[in-house]
Structure formats: structure tokens, C-alpha cells
Image (tube, grey):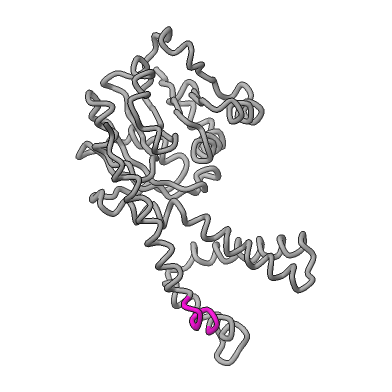
């Protein structure tokens, strides 16, 4: 018998998961019957309906109490502040067999457990948007000591899955894995603006940057060298690359990255410190 998936709050991560699942639909639908979405924002719901059509099913909040079904796989991907007593509105959708996957930044397993006290299957996740192309990095920590293969099925379809034994590192993982793509996009954004400021065509600059970093990602994936060695291999002494790297060093590039990650960790801890009532 196939089960159903429910995504509560379908933003960027929710849509990325759906894209990844649908990319591998033959495998996905061997165990899953339907993707369900519970989304309060009318604007977002309209977008999702246009994007997915009949590939997903939408639950209407006004009709939730009439639903008799219980969902086995539930992804909590709303804003962390929405982890509050309003969730009682949805409680008839779950039972003790429900597996909760939380992507709520800063919210610990016990924060989730507070709202779902009968559930032992609660898995905290940090993942990133490459799950949409089945190349995501997915870190998890579970309330249970042992997680089964079936509980990781929906995650392994969309990326590589790693277990984090100590939850205290989750804020750091959030900054590195969750925010990591944004760091990369920001670098590309800055490089493109620089290229345009020198008179290069916008479309052309975008294309060559894409090709440069797609190729670079391939090298990273194929070779065992550490990042420092890879950087040194392409930095000729007295050359143009060395001049660029020296400028970054002079302007404390590594310290800037360190500070940005630390600020992200602080924000995650702030979200974590807002205890439920």
C-alpha cells in the first residue's frame, strides 16, 4: 500500500523537494500515492497550482476537520515563528505513526516534540535547494536512535543524506549547507555586476560565469584534492589570479566569510531561543 506526503508551508524548500521527487517520479511513486500541500498564502497557492497543476493536491484549511485520512509523511516547512499552538488545527491529520520532517531553522527536536507529544518519529533536517535537481546535501538528526531506510526514502531520492549525531552542530550546518547556495549566488552576482561595469554584455557575462562554475563544480566532485590545493593549482606565482587572491586576502575575505557564518549561527540561536508557550 502506497502512502501520501503532506507539505505544510510550501516555500522554496517545499517546491525544491517536489521538483526533485517529480524528477524521479518512477521511483517516487513506487511508495507514494500523492503529494499534498497545505498552504495558507493565496498568492503562493496560485503560483503552486500554475507550476504543478494536477501533479499535487491542495488541502483546504476550512475542510481539514472533515478529513478522515492520516498522513504518514509530513514535512514542516513553514516559517519557524509559525511553530505555535495554531498547529492544533491540523492535529486530526496525524497519528502516532506519522513521521515528521522539520526544516524549521533554529527549531530543535524537543521544540517539535512539544507540539506532537505522541510522535517518536521526528526528524530534523537541514537541506539545500539543489534537492530540486536531485543533488541536494541533506543533514538529519532524529529523535529516535535508529532511523529506518523507509524513513529516509524521500530524502535519498533528492540528494546525499548524512546523519548528524549531535544536534548542537545544527546551527552551523544551517549556515553552511542551508545558506551555502546563497553565498555562491552572491559571488556570481558580484562577478556579473563587475563584468557589466567593464562593458561586457549582461547575457554573455551570465553565460560564461555559468559555464565557468559548472566546470569548476565538476572538478571539485571528481578530484580528492582539498580546496586549498585546488586553489593553489590554478594560482600561478606572479600572475593575474594571484593578484586577485592577494586582494581578497588583504581585505580579509576569509574573516568576512567567518563573520557571515557566525552571524547566521547567531540568528539560528535566536530562533531557537524563542521558546513555545
Q: Residue furthest bottom?
A: 238
Indicate the position of residue 49 as horizontal and vertical percent values: 62, 25
Apparent side of residue 69 relative to residue 53 in the rendered image (left or right): left
Q: Nearer the viewer, residue 247 or 18?
A: 247
Q: Quadrant of residue 229?
A: bottom left
Indicate the position of residue 115 as horizontal and vertical percent values: 28, 27
Q: Nearer the viewer, residue 226 or 180?
A: 180
Indicate the position of residue 60 as horizontal and vertical percent values: 51, 16
The magenta stretch is 246-252
Quadrant holding the N terminus: top left
Residue 209 magenta: no
Q: Quadrant of residue 46?
A: top right
Residue at coordinates 28% horizontally, 42% vertically from top-left? 108
Residue at coordinates 38% horizontally, 20% vertically from top-left? 71
What secondary structure prevails in the magenta region?
A: helix
Q: Indicate whether 132 appears above or below 26.
A: below
Indicate the position of residue 116 as horizontal and vertical percent values: 27, 26
Quadrant holding the C terminus: top left
Residue at coordinates 31% horizontally, 45% vertically from top-left? 272
Apparent side of residue 122 relative to residue 20 in the rendered image (left or right): left
Amino acid at each position: 500500500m502506497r502512502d501520501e506526503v503532506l507539505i505544510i508551508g510550501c516555500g522554496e524548500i517545499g517546491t525544491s523537494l517536489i521538483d526533485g521527487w517529480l524528477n524521479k517520479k518512477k521511483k517516487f511513486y513506487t511508495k507514494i500515492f500523492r503529494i499534498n500541500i497545505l498552504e495558507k498564502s493565496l498568492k503562493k497557492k496560485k503560483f503552486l497550482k500554475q507550476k504543478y497543476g494536477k501533479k499535487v493536491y491542495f488541502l483546504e484549511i476550512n475542510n481539514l476537520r472533515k478529513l478522515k485520512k492520516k498522513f504518514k509523511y509530513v514535512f514542516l516547512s513553514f516559517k519557524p515563528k509559525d511553530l505555535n499552538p495554531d498547529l492544533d488545527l491540523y492535529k486530526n491529520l496525524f497519528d502516532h505513526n506519522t513521521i515528521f520532517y522539520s526544516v524549521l531553522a533554529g527549531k530543535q527536536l524537543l521544540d517539535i516534540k512539544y507540539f506532537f507529544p505522541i510522535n517518536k518519529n521526528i526528524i530534523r533536517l537541514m537541506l539545500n535547494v539543489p534537492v530540486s535537481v536531485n543533488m541536494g546535501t541533506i543533514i538529519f538528526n532524529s529523535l529516535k536512535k535508529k532511523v529506518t531506510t523507509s524513513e529516509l526514502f524521500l530524502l535519498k531520492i533528492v540528494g546525499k543524506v548524512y546523519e548528524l549525531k549531535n544536534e548542537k552542530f545544527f546551527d552551523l550546518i544551517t549556515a553552511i549547507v542551508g545558506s551555502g547556495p546563497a553565498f555562491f549566488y552572491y559571488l556570481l552576482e558580484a562577478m556579473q555586476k563587475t563584468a557589466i561595469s567593464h562593458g561586457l554584455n549582461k547575457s554573455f557575462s551570465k553565460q560564461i560565469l555559468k559555464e565557468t562554475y559548472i566546470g569548476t563544480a565538476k572538478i571539485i566532485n571528481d578530484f580528492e584534492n582539498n580546496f586549498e590545493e585546488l586553489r593553489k593549482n590554478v594560482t600561478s606565482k606572479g600572475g593575474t589570479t594571484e593578484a586577485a587572491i592577494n586582494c581578497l586576502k588583504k581585505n580579509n575575505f576569509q574573516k568576512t566569510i567567518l563573520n557571515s557564518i557566525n552571524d547566521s549561527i547567531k540568528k539560528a540561536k535566536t530562533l531557537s531561543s524563542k521558546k513555545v508557550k
